[in-house]
Amino acid sequence: MPWVGRKKIAFVPLSRSNAHPPDLVPPDWETDIMRRVLYDPDPTTGRDRSLRAFIRAASSGVADLDAIVTERHSVDQQDVPAAILEPELGARLRADGCDAAAIVMLGGPGAGTNSGFWSRFVMLEAVGVWAMELMHGLTGFTDLYAFGNDVDPQDPTIGMYDEMSASSATHPTAYTKLGIQWLDPASIAHHTGRVGSYALHAISLAQPPPNGRVAAVRIGADVPYVMVEARLKADAFDASIPREGVIVYAVQTPDPLGHRVDMLRPVILKAPQALSVGEAFVSDPISVRVTGAIPGGFVVSVDDSSAPFVSGELLSYGDAGTPGNVSNPITVGFGGWQAFTHVFAGRNAAGEDRIYAVDHDGQLLSYGDAGTAGNVSNPIVVGFGGWQAFTHLFAGRNAGGEDRIYAVDQGGQLLSYGDAGTPGNVSDPIVVGFGGWQAFSQLFGGRNAGGEDRIYAVDQGGQLLSYGDAGTPGNVSDPTVVGFGGWQAFSQLFGGRNAGGEDRIYAVVA
């Protein structure tokens, strides 16, 4: 059964009459037990470190407990099974409404164990041990730490990032909280498609997360699958986690309560430590990058290169300059780019590289690309309207080295604009070509091998023409025919530069 709501737990003080070394029974043992269970302030910080405080924090108030301490008992036995008092007390405690019972002993650590209804631990053991054993009994969730017969000893366990692995009173992972119903399944994002961005709400904070955030991200429908969550030292219990950041771990069992399959460790860390902002976990086909910190969590970008692309994503490739060596793409824009009537790259007057787009209202938008998944900036509206009316729109540079935006209007004139990089500050146009430019099937800016900035055009005969722009009205040069025919067959043409710094003309075969 899940530990949801308030559970009644009986704590039974049990000493051994002939223990080696002898059990030293405290005079007010019952009060000591009740303090450990209900309210146990740290002498330095004053923070409550009791069993009840941990359960309430770890479950976000979903679980709670009532406690009773029974009369003292004693046995003449060195090694005491957890259920040793079942014949004497079991029926009575259940009839009294108890959901679980624990014998509390004296002596040294290492005594924590569970046997269904009954748990066993000692006074010297920390609250994490008490919590783990009772959680076993009340939820059925198993141990996540390493077993001696695991077949994957090279894979690290989840360690201090889960109470059921370290018994150290740290918060359970999202996987564990989900399994014992301390986390709403709706708070887990299931990553689909290629790339997604998620705001993670630290698992040690109260759940469910606020609107716009998730408790964790699951990548993959089948076992094994990957989980991504944020960990912060946000309370007295997670103060002892190894490092704040984003943890990436794999779940290797289909069982929600952690039971092993084929002796594989149920949960293993994939990244050796929590990831900070700017750090990434990469393991083909999955990458997880921490792109930012937010109050109470982190923002991550998840890329699954095995998934198909989604319509409207903006992809970024690198060209090494050799056959077939275009890199794997980065999805820098998550969707909606198919709605723009024009999209092209250029540079504004401040020397910033930008991506320009014309929206359905005819506004000219300017984006920056940080070079990582999903990190295209919010747009600046540099032109307030009317840009949808141009038949051609592209970026280039005139002979004076000025970065310009070129447009062909309804009258066939070639216009040249400057972008100051601030809202609405595209300059008044210069008419650099007086007419006929609407007849070209393709127009684009580029640079030739001699380092000259040029405007390229494909005429009605399929020739590739090269023009220079002097930057003054009507002073586009006479064209040079740089390609003698067949250029009309390409569906896309544009200029750019490869990774080796070579200026190139790119073409898409129709």
Image (tube, helix red, strand yellow):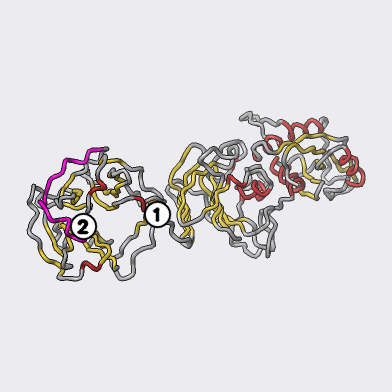
Cα separation, mark 2 vs mark 1, equals: 23 Å
Disc 2 to disc 1: CB gap under 8 Å: no
Q: Position of residue 375 (x, y in %)?
A: 38, 48
Q: Is residue 276 left or right of residue 398?
A: right
| Residue 56 seen in render | yes
User: What is the three-letter code of the residue carrying label 2?
Assistant: Phe
Could you tell me which residue is drawn at 84 percent across and 50 percent down?
81
What segment is highlighted magenta in the picture?
424-445
Q: Which residue occupies the foreground of this view, 332 or 361? A: 361
- What percent of the width, then of the height, locates residue 457? 17, 60
The quarter of the picture where residue 366 lies is top left
Q: Position of residue 412 (x, y in %)?
A: 15, 52
Whether residue 160 is visible to the viewer of this picture, yes or no, is: no
Q: Residue at x 15, y 50 (%)?
A: 411
Disc 1 secondary structure class: loop
**Numbered tag placed on residue 68 in the rendering:** none
In the picture of the structure, the residue carrying the numbered disc 2 is: 444
Query: In terms of sequence position, does the residue under pointer 2 or pointer 1 come before the other?
Result: 1
Along the viewing direction, whichever of 145 and 442 lies nearer the viewer: 442
Q: Quadrant of the C terminus?
A: bottom left
How busy is the neighbourhood of tag 1: few (under 14 within 10 Å), some, or many (20 plus)? Answer: some
**Residue 425, placed above or below residue 111:** above
Q: Is residue 432 magenta?
A: yes
Residue at label 1? 313
Q: Is residue 500 left or right of residue 223?
A: left
